[in-house]
Every structure is written in structure tokens, then in C-alpha cells.
Image (cartoon, rainbow, N blue to C red):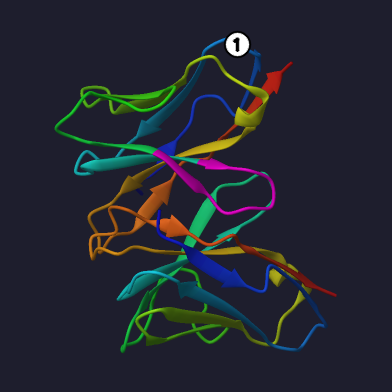
Amino acid sequence: GAVVSQHPSRVICKSGTSVKIECRSLDFQATTMFWYRQFPKKSLMLMATSNEGSKATYEQGVEKDKFLINHASLTLSTLTVTSAHPEDSSFYICSASPDRLNTEAFFGQGTRLTVV
Amino acid sequence: GESVGLHLPTLSVQEGDNSIINCAYSNSASDYFIWYKQESGKGPQFIIDIRSNMDKRQGQRVTVLLNKTVKHLSLQIAATQPGDSAVYFCAENSNQGGKLIFGQGTELSVKP
């Protein structure tokens, strides 16, 4: 199947710093990618829809200035957690699909963010 | 709001037994459903999907059943193996630009 790669898989940062997470579709182009957040023993919560060449669409309650999303090419979306705090510690996952309706979504391996 | 939920948060089975994981959905407009398997520290992995014009679909050792009347989805795993131990999520495609709404997940534990 198609491959979506996330980098880094783990990151530890100090409070107040910013962290960038990359999501790449390796063998297909994706005009839309999705970013999720997952707490331990919980389900995936959609944060935002990343749209190539335009602004991301954020879900209700997700701070767009806190979680900056850039989708500069058809194979790369980035999520930047700005001024990170310990409560931002979580597992972040991206997904992408070769088709616009996202009927075949492929997920990255996730990024474990720990803010100390 | 619309949501997808699961009846059982944990399920423990003996190796070789069949497993059934259930899911309820509330968005009657959803027309595409997917089951994912997530191992610890990894992203979700596609297992099987089904469209609303079907009520059953079979894969290798897995079967998904869809009951639109009661908005219920289930995943059946035949001859469950230790490697099947993971958290299983159902998800529905909300027809809103491809957004997936995930259920709460069921942790499957297979005893050897």
C-alpha cells in the first residue's frame, strides 16, 4: 500500500520552544492531509485539515496560532507546535490519501512529543 | 454532535478463538466505514472497509458487518492470534472533505 512517513518519531523539547513535525506521502500526491492528536488510551482527535496551496482548516477548539500547518507541496505537510507547553505533550499522527475523498487514508507512524 | 463509539473498551480472547469488536455510529449520512488496527506507539493500520451499499465484506481472517438500520458496525477476526493484540478503531468518512471520525477504540488482548 501507499506510504506516509512522519518525522521525527519522537521529540523532547523544552517549554517555550517550537517543534516542527513533517508528514510526507512517499509514493503519491496528496492535496489534502489530516493531522490528529491522540492521548494515551484515547482515540484519534482530528485537529485540522491541511490543504495544499491554501490555509489549513482547523477543528473547533484547536488554536491555529498554536498549531501552525503548512502544506507547501503535494507530498509534504508540516505541523509546528509553537511555544510548546507540557500540556501539548501527546502523540501526533498525520494521514493522507491518493484520492480527494480520502476513501483510502494512510497514516504516518506518529510523533511522540514530550514537552519538559 | 455526530460521533462514532464502541460498546466494549477491552476484549480478551484465547488464541484460536474468534473475536468480535463492535461499533455504533450516529451519522446516518455516512456512507463509508473503515476499521483500523493500532499497535502501541504506531499509527493506525488499515484493516478493512465497507461502503453503505453493502452489509458484509470479507478479507483475510476478517469480516466487517454493517447494519444501517441500527447504525452498527462490527469487526470479526477469525482464529485470533497473539499478533492481533492491538487497539482497534472504527472510523466513518463524514463526507466533509474526507474527514474521518474515529470511535473510542477497543483494546484486544489475545492470550496464548
Place of residue A84 in the rendered image (x, y in percent of width and height, measured from the top left): 71, 81
Residue placed furthest toward the left = B53
Q: Regarding mark 1 in the picture, which secondary structure is present there?
A: loop
Whether B98 is among the magenta residues is no
Query: How many callouts does the rendering have?
Result: 1
Relative side of A2 to B98, left or right: right
- Relative to B107, is B78 above or below? above
- List the residue tagged with mark 1: B16
Whether B46 is among the magenta residues is yes
Place of residue A59 in the rendered image (x, y in percent of width and height, measured from the top left): 42, 68
Q: Amino acid under label 1?
A: Gly
Q: Residue at x 59, y 60 (%)?
A: A109
Tell me where the magenta segment starts and ends, as one range: B37-47
Q: What is the chain letter for disc 1?
A: B
Place of residue B2 in the rendered image (x, y in percent of width and height, measured from the top left): 34, 46
Q: Quadrant of the C terminus of chain A?
A: bottom right
Relative side of A62 to B93, left or right: right
- Relative to B13, is B85 above or below? below
- Relative to B27, is B72 above or below? above
Q: Residue at x 52, y 49 (%)?
A: B44
Is disc 1 surrounded by few (<14), some (14 to 19) or many (20+) residues within 10 Å? Answer: some
Which of A99/B104 is in front?
A: A99
Q: Residue at x 23, y 44 (%)?
A: B30
Place of residue B3 in the rendered image (x, y in percent of width and height, measured from the top left): 39, 44
Q: Residue at x 41, y 26 (%)?
A: B60
